[in-house]
Image (tube, rainbow, N blue to C red):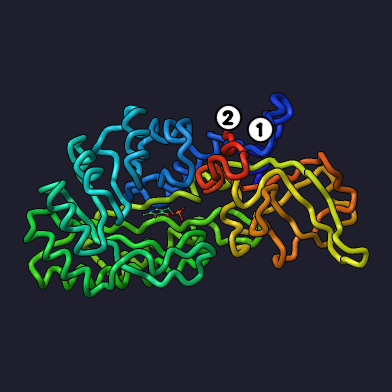
Amino acid sequence: MTPEAAAALARMDRHLQDTTPATPCVVIDLATVRARFAALQALLPDARILYAVKANPAAPVIAALAALACAFDLASAGEIDRCVGLGIGADRVCFGNTIKRESDIARAHALGIDLFAFDSAGELDKLARAAPGARVFCRISVHGRGAEWPLTRKFGCAPRMATELLVLARARGLRPVGLSFHVGSQQVDPNQWAIAIGTAAEVFRACRRGGVALELLNIGGGLPAQYRTPVPPLTVYTATILAALHRHFGGSQPALMVEPGRYMVGDAGMLRSQVLLIARHGNHDDRRWVYLDAGRYNGLAETQGESIRYRLRTPHDGTAAEPVILAGPTCDSTDIIYDRAGYTLPLALAIGDSVDFLSAGAYTASYASVEFNGFPPLATYCL
Ligand SMILES: Cc1ncc(COP(=O)(O)O)c(C=O)c1O
């Protein structure tokens, strides 16, 4: 753990000790969020950074970033309302979801929002009707290999179709300005950006041949948080991105946009849970079931498929440990957190002890259910 990460954890621990909030809950260290923004901006000085609000929409997180030069990638009318309510100007936001309600597009346009994503002819039709003259960019599909939380298939059109759609956009009275891609969330292979930038450069050239000069490249999210498996340092990602831009675009670099969500808030937070029950279901069971008050439906949605593997912390770390099956509190047998991922927990762990999920600031509170089994939404406390 870096000294900065250790200091942030100490601040969050102190807060939990002083306030003893009900569990489960998420604690966010805003100083870490600010430092993340500054670090990325220093390494990509020419890029416009848009925080992907979906990762953690807590108002203090948005406000902390709004106080810096950060812009915002928004997915819905709800996120637009929250940002507008915090006084963020329309020129600092992008409506980046490729699946929008037409009336929401119209409202965004009326508010002055002028940058929209699309990846299909149907969405282009809606944009042409509801946001005439707006700046639009087309999301191209990339395969997402190497991502622990891939965003493949559902989003992005084939690069060749992107060229056709961008030409069509102009014919419909929109302003086709560029391309976007997302290499998959928690992407542990920086080279995926290099591959996608190469593909994007080909579409830029094809568009130019079709009479459309693109000027914007949105390289999406995907930058990782630190879960159980080590990830390359941020400098390796940014160096790979800059080298690929140089290689594929040479002297005519597009304006660059980057939309980090997980990177910005993941390591800035932790989720505190409590042990509700420890059980064996047969006298010869080789593993204990450890049931927590947090599970798949109240904060740990990304443990689906055991994809995101958080680092865990208990008050007994360093003592003898044994393999466990970790599960949540709801009456649903899909509410199992980790079974196959090889987690062990101390034998001394007891009912009432805390189990902390580290680097859990992203996609936890925002993914939690509202009332499944009567459990309340996951509370977030920002320092
Ligand atoms: C359009 C868009 N941009 C950015 C992000 C943020 O991705 P990440 O959290 O991997 O940085 C997402 C995540 O779903 C997204 O859909």
Question: Dot 1: few (<14), some (14–19), or many (≥20) neighbours within 10 Å?
Answer: some
Which residue appears at 49% of the width and 61% of the height?
236
Asked whether, in this view, residue 159 is left or right of residue 264, the answer is: left
In the picture as drawn, the residue positioned furthest to the right comes out as: 283
Residue type at tag 2: Leu
For label 1, the residue is 11
Callout 2 touching callout 1 (CB < 8 Å):
yes
Quick one: SS at disc 2?
Answer: loop
Q: x, y percentage for residue 195?
A: 38, 72
Kindly report which numbered mark, 2 or 1, lies closer to the viewer in this rendering.
2
Relative height, residue 158 to residue 5 (above, below): below
Asked whether, in this view, residue 29 is left or right of residue 154, the answer is: right
- Residue 70's image quarter? top left
- Residue 82's image quarter? top left
Which residue appears at 45% of the width and 42% of the height?
37
Which residue appears at 53% of the width and 40% of the height?
370
Q: x, y percentage for residue 318?
A: 85, 51
Q: Which quarter of the figure is the C terminus placed in? A: top right
Question: Dot 2: few (<14), some (14–19), or many (≥20) neighbours within 10 Å?
Answer: some
Q: Quadrant of ligand 1?
A: bottom left
| Cα distance in 3D space between marks 2 and 1 | 8 Å
For label 2, the residue is 383
Residue type at tag 1: Arg
Kindly identify which numbered label has been placed on residue 196.
none
Which residue appears at 45% of the width and 39% of the height?
57
Camera-nearest residue between 201 and 317: 317
Relative height, residue 46 to residue 167 (above, below): above
